[in-house]
Amino acid sequence: MPAKSEKQRKFMGAELQRKREGKKTKTDMSEKELEKYASKADKDRKS
């Protein structure tokens, strides 16, 4: 499920980066969940 807003997507992307660096995150979500939220929806992507 992609993020609902650009602000949420950026936050989840930052959380994903912290998770990959082994740092503490604010969301306690798994890396896979964070990847889903940090991605853009297919309709938002430009080819």
Image (cartoon, rainbow, N blue to C red):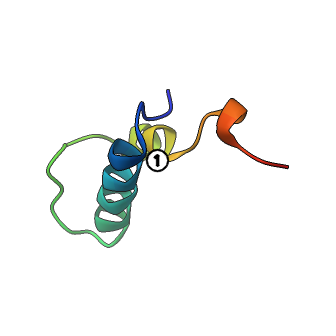
Residue type pointed to by label 1: Ala
| Residue in the picture at 26% in, 69% down | 22
Secondary structure beneath dot 1 equals helix
| Residue in the picture at 55% in, 45% down | 39
Task: Locate residue 45 relative to residue 9 in the image: left or right.
Answer: right
Q: Outermost residue toward the right? A: 47
Q: Percent x, y for residue 31? A: 40, 48
Task: Locate residue 32 relative to residue 47 in the image: left or right.
Answer: left
Quadrant in the rendering for residue 21: bottom left
Q: Is residue 29 above or below residue 15?
A: above
The residue that mark 1 highlights is: 38
Q: Is residue 25 above or below residue 8?
A: below
Closer to the camera, 36 or 5? 5
Q: Is residue 24 above or below residue 11?
A: below
Closer to the camera, 27 or 6? 6
| Residue in the picture at 58% in, 42% down | 40
Q: Percent x, y for residue 44? A: 66, 38
Quadrant in the rendering for residue 37: top left
